[in-house]
Image: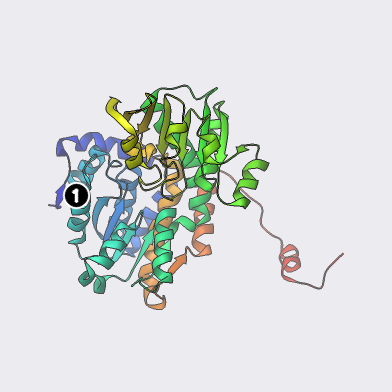
Amino acid sequence: MAKYDVKDLGLANKGKLRIEWAAQEMPVLKSITDRFKKEKPLKGMRVIACLHVTTETANLMETLKVGGAEISLCASNPLSTQDDVAASLVKNSGISVFAIKGEDTKTYYRHIKDALAIKPQITMDDGADVVSILHKTEKALLKNVIGGTEETTTGVIRLKAMAADGALQYPIIAVNDAYTKHLFDNRYGTGQSTLDGVIRATNRLISGSVVVVAGYGWCGRGVAMRVRGLGARTIVTEIDPLKALEATMDGYEVMPMADAAKIGDIFITATGDINVVSGKSFPLMKDGAIVCNTGHFNVEIDIESLKKLSKAKRTIRDYVEEYTLKSGKRIYLLGEGRLINLAAAEGHPSAVMDMSFANQALSAEYMVKNAKKLQNKVYSVPEKIDKEIARLKLKAMGIKIDALTPEQKNYLESWEMGT
C-alpha cells in the first residue's frame, strides 16, 4: 500500500473519472506512455515530484510509473491540490501522495519531507522547493540524486542563481525553457486559467473593466491577451524597457504601477518578484479594487502591508478576502495571494499541459541516460526533444507541415549562393 496523507480516500472514484477526462486531451503524453510501457526507461528510479496535484499531473505520474519509476508526490503550492485526484492516485494507482488542498505552511513543508523519504534519485520540481530543502536541511539525501527537472519560471530563476553561486549539487533540466512549454503553457495556459480563476472567485464582468497586468513575460502576455479579448481596458506595468516597448507595440497601455493603481479595477501580478503591488499601491486604489496573483509564490502582493493598512478583514466569498483600509476603502484579495488559477480554478487546460508534461517525462528519461555526462548546472531541454513534442502534438491535431527539399536545405547551409 502506498504511503499517503490526503484529505479523503473516499474521493478516489470521482478523481479517477476526472483524470480520465483530462487524458482525452493529452495525446502526446499518451504516446510517450505507450512507449514507456514497452521500454521501461525509468526502471529502478526513485522520483520525487513536487508539482500541482491536478488531473494533468496524475497522468504524468501514471506515465512515470509505467516507465518503471517509484514515485512520491507532494504539492508545490498549499492551495493547488485537487483532493479527489490525490485520493485516486493513492487508491487506484498505488502512488504515494502527500498533499491536501488548503494545508498550512507547516504541513506543506512536512509533506515535502514525507515525500523525500523515498530517497529520490530524480527530483521533479515546480518552484524549486525540493531542491532548496535538499541543499539546506536534507543534505544527506543529495548523494542519491543524479539529476532533476524544473517546471516553472520562478524555479528556474532560483536554480540558475544557485548554479551561479556554485551551490547547486546536481544537474537540472529547465523544462520551463522548452519552446513547447513556455510559448504555450505560460501564454495560453496561464492566460485562460488565470481568467477562469478570477471569474470563478468573483463572478465579476471583465468586459468594460480596467485590468492591470503586472509583468509582460510569457504569462503576462497570455493574461493581457485574454482580458483584452473579454473586452477589458488592459494596462501593463513593466520594469524591462524591451518588454514595455513590446507591450506598447501590441496595443496595450503601459505605465508605472503608481499610476495604474489609481485607475485599475482588477490587478493581476505575473512577474515572479516580490512586492509588485506594494504597500504604496493600496491607498491609491479605488474602493472595491480586486488584487490577485498568477506567479508561483504568494510574494508578488505585499500582503503584510495590506494587513497593516487595514482596520478590518473578512472572507466575503470563497477565495475572496475583503480588507477594509483605515480610509474606509475596500480591497479584495483573491486566493490568499497564491496562484489564482489553481487556488480558485483547476489550473491549465489538459491540452496545453500535454506538452509541458511530455517535456517532464522525456527530460526524466534524458537525465537517466545522460546524468553522468552533465555538470551541476541548469540545462535547457534538448532541441531534439522539443521538436519531437511539437511534431507529436501536430500529428495528434491532424496538422501536416512541409519539409525542406535537399536543394532548400543545401541553400540554408551554404554561403556561396547570394543575390
Q: Is residue 338 in view from this perspective?
A: no
Indicate the position of residue 134 as horizontal and vertical percent values: 26, 65
Q: Residue furthest bottom?
A: 373
Q: Residues within 10 Å of mark 1 (few under 14, many from 20)?
A: few
Residue drawn at (37%, 54%), measured in percent from left and top? Answer: 34
Front in this rendered view, residue 93 or 257: 257
Name the element at disc 1.
helix
Horizontal relation, residue 252 to residue 38: left or right = right
Q: Hey, what amino acid is under mark 1?
A: Lys
Q: Quadrant of the C terminus?
A: bottom right
- Name which quarter of the figure residue 46 lies in: bottom left
Q: Is residue 161 above or below residue 182?
A: below
**Placement of 106 over or under 18, stated as above or below:** below
Foreground residue, 316 or 283?
Answer: 283
Q: Closer to the camera, 143 or 285?
A: 285
* Residue at 43% over, 71% down: 164
Q: Is residue 385 above or below residue 305?
A: below
177 on left or right of 305: right
According to the picture, the residue beneath numbered tag 1 turns out to be 106
Residue furthest to the left in view is 1
Name the residue rendered at 52%, 63% in the picture: 384
Residue 373: x %, y % from top left: 41, 78
Whether residue 191 is visible: yes
**x, y (%) of residue 99?**
22, 46
- Residue at the far right in the pictured view: 419
